[in-house]
Image (cartoon, coloured by chain):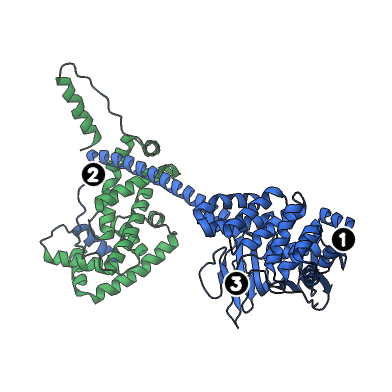
Chain colours: A green, B blue
Amino acid sequence: MNIRAIRGKGSEAPASAPGAKVLALPSPPTSEQELVAGLIAHRPSAVQALYSQYSGIVRRILIQALGSDRDVEDLTQDTLITVIKRASALRKVQSLRCFVIGVAIHLAKNENRRRAIRKFVGLDDLIEVPVVAPHDTAMVQGVRHLYQALDRMDVTARMAFVLRFVHGCDLAETATACGCTIATIRRKLVRAEARFTALAQADPVLRDFLNQSGGAP
Amino acid sequence: MTLSDFERAANAMRKSVAVGSEGGPVQGVHLVEALKRRMHKEAQTRRFTAGTGCALLLVGVLVAVRQHQPRILSYQVGTSKERGVLGDYVSAPTGKSLELHFSEGSQIVLESRTRVRVTGTTSHGAMMTLEDGRARADIVHRKGADWRILAGPYVVGVTGTSFDVGYDVKTQTFELKMHSGIVKVLGPGLESPVEVRDTQSFVLSANAAESAKESNNTVVHPEPDPNIDSTHPPTADALAANAVLSGPTRSFGNKSVASQVSSASAAAAANSPASESWARLGARGQHRRIVELVERQGLESATATASGPDLFALGNAARFTGKPGVAVRAYQAVRQRFSNSDEASGAAFFLGRLSESSDPTRAMGWYERYVAEAPKGAWVADALGRHLVLLNGTQGAASAQGAAKNYLGRFPNGPYAGFARTILGP
């Protein structure tokens, strides 16, 4: 469902009622420049367009980065509200996607730290990772071990892994989103991968999971 | 082509981790509402923060202003942590000294059996009455410091210095020994304030009317005054009368230490050869001689024939030699025969002093009469103060409120100001 579909339905309903007026809904922004301008002006149509275009990727990044879908709707909303509030500071309109991802990563890092502290002091229970097939015990175990390995890595490197390898962002986008230089993010990824490989070698469950599910997508 | 571990992990994550559905326009409407709520909340937070900041700033300014405001001095007695009460007697025990610590750092050390009263404090200093004994004062020198130490009828004005001050009620001897700095002394026999500095000493006896200042201690031998009631605070008045009326002129460095003989008394003494003798004897402190002469002549004859100044001198001499009955007769004779003279009003004051212990009501009457007859007289502050003490003692603090207000209105820094404030309460 999208805005155009709603408008289409809306325009049909009053036509059948006698004396009813047809109200034109504001048209959504057609380009990123218009979208950013609308966000700066807090136009509802621009906000809805932002949600339509970016809520999916934000949600995916948050779930994959955090390994949990708990509070993901709130975090998604926080991410998009932060984007709207800081839209006026956005200099390059073309980098809106990168900016949204950067805000999501920033919030995910903070949330990750917060959850680590809560877990450390015993306030957080074990969080189950949402899997595609929850009844597949091997998959559930494999995903759990995968996130246990990621939990033992540097937070920035973990976020960079999600962006670079899961979402296919290039190094420049990844570096911008993580607030690092390209050289730094490359170095962090190399180190992180070496550590991940070592962890995977030492964990038979994770090794089997990667061998079975880690083939070509 | 072999995949790296990260690539295999990414593939596994994409295949296995559920990421939910895409957001639609309905959720977008919620986001608009959430944005409005967030903006409203943030505006509230900003207002609250600004308000709190302003309040804290205001509190900070008030605290800073208060910190910079001069504080009224307080004091503690000995090692006690409690604040000393204005007007309370402080007495050093026998054989031991006692310290008074003031909040700005000044310290008064009372020698054994010394009695003092802190009658008032300001942000600049304190006013103390030294009833009897000796005390070592170390006053911190500060800008605008103003301390007053009343020792008998004498007032020591201090801005910051160290000195020993003493007053002996029995011998009515005022003694001051400087250690450093400068003080000013005021009192009977001193026309103007006398500066005592460095390591000088200053001894003054109202009875003997002797004063001297040397670089070393000076010793005087005054006559005792058994009439002085040492239990009554303060004991300035009787001594003041003697000193004021009998003090001879003395050279005192650059200053003139002179008696403040009232012009009327001096004129009467000069014009009347018959009365000249008692007045002059009194001026030299020969009080016993006066009494002997009167006893020889007969009291009835003497009071019937002597001049006003002579009768007044007789009254003083009788008080100082322990003959209150003779003193009363002499003062009454002055009032009967010279009713409009300065001596008559002065006699009213001393009749009040002599009546205090036996008939307080009568004494109050004499004080009222003195104030009415000599509203600008030398002992008005003492008369009103003594009247206040007696009123409080006989009729209670509630009845003395008016008198206390009247006293403070006329003499806010007088010797009984602390006592008056105690009656009025906080």
In this view, the residue in front, B176 or B333, is B333
Q: CA distance from mark 2 to mark 3?
A: 81 Å
* Image coordinates for residue B364, horizontal then vertical, percent: 60, 55
Q: Residue A114's quadrant in the figure? A: bottom left
Which is in the foreground here, disc 2 or disc 1? 1
Q: Is residue A62 above or below residue A49?
A: below
From where the camera sits, is residue A68 visible? yes
Q: Are marks 2 and 3 in contact (CB under 8 Å)?
A: no
Callouts 2 and 3 on one subunit = yes
Mark 3 and mark 1: span between their CA atoms?
A: 53 Å
Give the SS element for disc 1.
Answer: helix
> What whole-number distance in Å separates the C-alpha atoms at marks 2 and 1?
126 Å
- Numbered tag placed on residue B23 in the rendering: 2
Rendered image: mark on residue A170: none
Disc 2 crowd rating (10 Å Cα; few below 14, some 14-19, many 20+) is many
In this orientation, does residue B153 appear? Answer: no
Q: Secondary structure at mark 3?
A: strand
In the rendered picture of this protein, how many numbered marks are placed on residues?
3
Q: Chain of mark 1?
A: B
Residue B141, by quadrant, is bottom right
Q: Which residue is mark 1?
A: B274
B393 or B357: nearer the eye? Answer: B357
Label located before the other in sequence (2 or 3) = 2
Nearer the observer: mark 2 or 3; the answer is 3
Name the amino acid type tagged 2: Gly
User: Does B364 sit left or right of A103 as displayed?
Assistant: right
Quadrant housing the N terminus of chain B = bottom left
* Residue hosting label 3: B100
Q: Quadrant of residue B253?
A: bottom right
